[in-house]
């Protein structure tokens, strides 16, 4: 049970004010059996990009992600045990319902939290009724769910499947991307409001966990939800669809103690962003919020698919959306020979409170904003560097952005997890002074005491990714940081 943490730990269990300070605690969800039920005819409806091979995704890819996280965040759970874990073909170390499960309060599994809240009878009744309503279950099915134990029921509510394989409702395969369900902003959390109906159940489960689990008791009164205004319900249904307030965590980044980024994208609306700005600035939770409007297309989806921060002074991004003056000069060459490019526009507005008013300023391009964050917000003395997807070489920039070259999770300043398939981006990191190492090799070096998480610097850890990349989300997407160290 995750809520059996000490008072000292609970006092600082929820706080994030940076993308790059040392990660102390996060929420994940391992690939579940629902992913193995995605069929081609429903993949797009369920927001999954491709049909994945579940065993490969689990054993050969995501398990490495868990082991790396444990080595950095909860070393005693794995140090000295790696061979035994790897040689256990049952994989019980990774299964929350098994006694061999690693059961960490630093690397926290969504499923265990859900099982905990289902142990509360009132919450169980409410949540089962709510899920059955949105999934249009029969009354008899609802009653049958109430007879199940919490562990079995938590699996059904997530996967839609019983342990015997009977399917009651669709899976929610995107739950592997826990970043999207919420974002911690200092000591508050913003819960998402998904753009697509396929994610409604995961949003509902998340809400019940954060409002009811003892682990999040300190968040009571600090949970921010996105709500529709009263005018919305008076609009005709076709207009309601175009006016819905939606926000997903991949479009939200807490980049500095007083500065939040929100992307306006295919999945996050300007109406939802306006709500967040008003609530955060009015409560003085942050000092400024920058909105980044990116093209609303599947290629990009969220802002964390086109850039993430790796170090206080280092960012990885898609060069075609960076819009530097050098890039503009290069593109002018094509104009001169009669092949005019069509650059995709990004609009950046920053809102801040001053003299009891909300004021705003603009940035000309993405790199200007990121440089501002490093130099002004984080007070970097070192020159700001940009590492480009695909090393900014055609066509690798776009190809590798599609397989999440810009979507990395920082474990501590300068040390991040990326995908092994993005070769040109790895070259770009090495050219900028970083080392790259495969996850399996790093784990063995940790186990042999050749390297340690404490001393590792400026390193990109390369995660196996043939199947994970089909899901269209990287290590940044697959994490919801709950606690990071304070910014130095």
Image (tube, grey):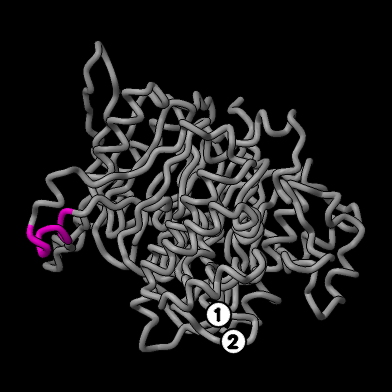
* SS label for mark 1: loop
Residue at the image point whose x is 79% and y is 72% from the top: 92
Residue at the image point whose x is 24% and y is 60% from the top: 296
Query: Is 484 one of the magenta-colored residues?
Result: no
- Looking at the picture, tell me which residue is in the foreground, 368 or 116: 116
Disc 1: which residue:
161
| Magenta segment boundaries in residue numbering | 236-243
| Left or right: where 464 falls relative to 367 | right
| Left or right: where 454 falls relative to 355 | right
Disc 2 vs disc 1: Cβ atoms closer than 8 Å?
yes
Q: Taking 15 as reference, is 67 above or below it?
A: below
- Looking at the picture, tell me which residue is in the foreground, 275 or 365: 275
Q: Taking 486 as reference, is 40 above or below it?
A: below
Residue 150: give its label.
none
| Left or right: where 364 falls relative to 233 | right
Q: Residue 394, percent across and down?
A: 37, 68
Q: Taking 126 as reference, is 380 above or below it?
A: above
Q: Residue 49 sits in which quadrant? A: bottom left
Q: Main secondary structure of the magenta part?
A: helix
Disc 2: which residue:
165
Residue at the image point whose x is 29% and y is 20% from the top: 353
Quadrant location of the C terminus in the rendered image:
top right
Q: Residue 398, percent across and down?
A: 37, 67
- On the question of residue 293 being in view, the answer is yes
* SS label for mark 2: loop
Residue at the image point whose x is 15% and y is 50% from the top: 232
Q: Residue 66, percent across and down?
A: 70, 61
Mark 2 vs mark 1, CA separation in Å? 6 Å
| Left or right: where 338 falls relative to 343 | left
Query: Is 241 one of the magenta-colored residues?
Result: yes
């Amino acid at each position: 049970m995750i809520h059996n943490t000490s008072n000292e730990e609970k006092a600082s269990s929820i706080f994030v004010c940076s993308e790059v300070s040392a990660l102390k605690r996060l929420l994940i969800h391992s690939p579940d059996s629902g992913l193995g039920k995605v069929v081609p005819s429903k993949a797009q409806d369920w927001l999954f990009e491709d049909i994945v091979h579940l065993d490969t995704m689990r054993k050969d890819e995501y398990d490495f992600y868990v082991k790396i996280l444990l080595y950095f965040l909860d070393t005693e759970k794995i140090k000295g045990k790696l061979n035994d874990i790897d040689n256990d073909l049952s994989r019980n170390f990774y299964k929350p319902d098994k006694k061999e499960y690693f059961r960490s309060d630093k690397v926290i599994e969504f499923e265990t939290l859900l099982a905990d809240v289902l142990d509360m009878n009132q919450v169980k009744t409410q949540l089962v009724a709510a899920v059955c309503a949105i999934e249009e279950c029969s009354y008899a099915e609802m009653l049958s769910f109430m007879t199940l134990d919490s562990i079995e029921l938590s699996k059904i509510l997530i996967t839609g499947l019983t342990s015997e394989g009977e399917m009651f409702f669709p899976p929610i395969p995107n739950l592997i991307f826990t970043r999207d369900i919420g974002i911690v902003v200092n000591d508050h959390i913003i819960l998402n409001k998904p753009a697509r109906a396929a994610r409604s159940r995961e949003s509902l489960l998340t809400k019940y966990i954060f409002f009811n689990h003892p682990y999040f008791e300190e968040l009571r009164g600090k949970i921010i939800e996105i709500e529709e205004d009263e005018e919305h319900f008076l609009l005709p249904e076709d207009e309601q669809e175009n006016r819905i307030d939606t926000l997903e965590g991949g479009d939200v980044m807490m980049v500095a103690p007083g500065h939040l980024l929100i992307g306006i994208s295919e999945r996050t609306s300007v109406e939802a962003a306006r709500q967040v700005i008003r609530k955060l600035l009015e409560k003085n939770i942050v000092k400024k919020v920058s909105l980044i409007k990116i093209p609303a297309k599947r290629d990009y989806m969220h802002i964390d698919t086109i850039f993430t921060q790796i170090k206080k002074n280092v960012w990885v991004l898609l060069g075609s959306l960076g819009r530097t003056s050098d890039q503009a000069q290069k593109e002018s060459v094509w104009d001169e020979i009669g092949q005019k490019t069509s650059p995709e526009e990004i609009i950046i507005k920053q809102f801040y409170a001053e003299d009891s008013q909300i004021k705003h300023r603009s940035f000309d391009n993405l790199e200007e904003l990121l440089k501002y964050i490093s130099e002004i917000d984080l007070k970097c003395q070192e020159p700001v560097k940009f590492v480009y997807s695909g090393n900014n070489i055609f066509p690798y920039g776009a190809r590798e952005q599609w397989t999440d070259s810009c979507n990395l999770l920082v474990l501590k300043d300068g040390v991040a997890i990326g995908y092994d398939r993005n070769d040109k981006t790895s070259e770009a990191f090495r050219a900028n002074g970083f080392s790259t190492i495969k996850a399996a090799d790093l784990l063995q070096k940790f186990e042999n005491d050749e390297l340690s998480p404490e001393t590792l610097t400026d390193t990109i850890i390369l995660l196996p990714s043939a199947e994970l990349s089909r899901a269209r989300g990287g290590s940044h997407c697959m994490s919801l940081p709950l606690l990071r160290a304070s910014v130095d």
